[in-house]
Image: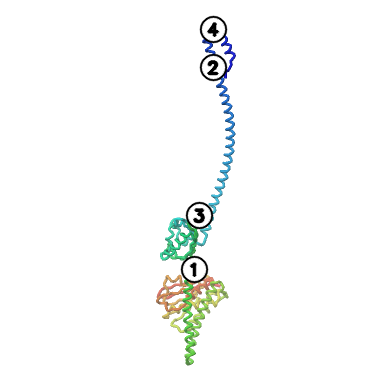
Amino acid sequence: MTLEFPAFTHLEQLTRQVGGPLAAELRNTVHTLRNQLHDARQEAERLAQAQADAIVNSAMMMSELQTARVDLEASNTVIQTMNQALQTALATAQENEKRFRLLSDAAPVGIFQIDQADRCIYVNTGLRRLLKTTETGKEADWRQWLAPNDQVTVLARWREAITQGKEFAHEFRILTTEGKLCWVLVHARPLQLNVNTWDGYIGTMTDITPHKEAEQLKDELVSTVSHELRTPLASLRGFTELMLERAFSPEKQREFIGIIQQEAIRLTNLINDFLDLQRIQSAKQRYDFTRVSLEPLLQEQLRFFSSEKSQHTFRISVDPALPFVHADADRLRQVLGNLLSNAIKFSPHGGGISLKASQEGEEIKVKVIDQGVGIPREILPKLFRKFFRVENADTRKIGGTGLGLALVKEIIEAHGGYVGVESIVGQGSTFYFTLPVA
């Protein structure tokens, strides 16, 4: 495109009229100026177009920036919402974990978790209490809990369970940190936090030692009662058959009838002791509480036992003006009868048996003292358990079911008192009980 400049056109016409070298030089100068001005105008137009393009581009960028800002604000809102949800979920998870641990520690059984590497990674307070330990970090190798004689069986059952991914349930013994054996029942099931993944096992451990001891006592009861029933029944049958088959003098018949009567009383007392103990422990025993004077009751029991043929000498000592007690007189007779009977049985070579009663503060304390074989110190805490019998060379021939002292304890505690024993081997024993003053 050729740009026209009127001033330059006029100059060009003048140079043609003038002519000469100066004119030629002037024409060249004018031509050069024309070209420069032409270039300047083109550059100005280019710059103007560039400016216009820049304005358009800037407007577009501003629009895009505005859109981006809106998108960014929306994204920020989403992020804040997600963050709040995450914080809420985290707080809920922490609260749930806290609640779980509180519930777990309050549970009356042991709770544990074993991971995929077969390590114990969690135990609750109940399990630490069962294991007799307060230390943490030592639970990982749970095999150390197993009693040596039970390890092979338990580990075989455990491997079978984890191999097949099934529940584990087994009774076995554990060894506490104090070296004590305890029977436990363990239930564990696979822990599956995600689909198709196995995350170990979680389970409970329940102390069933009392249950096992009760089973053992039940077995002992069957054995003991069978033996104790068999003895008087054999005597009853033997003497009745003898009297039916042969004729005896009146004196001999009276002697045999006396033996039959004693064995019948023994059998009756055995059955009554057992039934009474069952009623008391099932809270079905009824008591007839009245104001009771102890001295006549003690004298009565002492006369009863001293009237039997015995090598023992009996003494009684009662504080003057001994106050009344609030008690069931028949049950107190049962208590005194059991204690005096034991004193006689455990003094096979005779000796003195004393019955004492005295006031100590707001209580009356009654003691039955013998000079018999005595009882080892380590056995004393077990004496008032059901079916427990002292088994040693001095007492092996002495009969009994192990119910008498357990019955004494239950009756006295129902009266609001307590029982106890002191003994030295070879020197005798002192059994005592207390009753509150009426």
Where's residue 70, x and y in %? 59, 38
**Which residue is tagged 1?**
211
Disc 3 from disc 2: Cα separation: 85 Å
Q: Residue at x 43, y 71 (%)?
A: 379
User: In front: mark 3 or mark 2?
Assistant: 2
**Which residue is tagged 4?**
19
Disc 1 from disc 2: Cα separation: 119 Å
Estimate how packed mark 4 is, as few (under 14), some (14 to 19) or many (20 or more) residues with alpha carbons within 10 Å. Answer: few
Disc 3 from disc 4: Cα separation: 107 Å
Amino acid at dot 2:
Asn
Does the CB distance between marks 1 and 2 fall below 8 Å?
no
Q: Earlier in the sequence, mark 3 or mark 2?
A: 2
Where's residue 17, x and y in %? 56, 7
Seen from the viewer's position, the closer of residues 375 and 396 is: 396
Amino acid at dot 1:
His
Quarter holding the N terminus is top right
- Is 270 situated above or below 199? below
User: In front: mark 3 or mark 1?
Assistant: 3
Q: Earlier in the sequence, mark 3 or mark 4?
A: 4
Amino acid at dot 3:
Asn
SS of the residue under disc 4: loop
Disc 3 from disc 1: Cα separation: 39 Å
Disc 4 from disc 1: Cα separation: 141 Å
The mark found on residue 277 in the picture is none
**Which residue is tagged 3?**
196
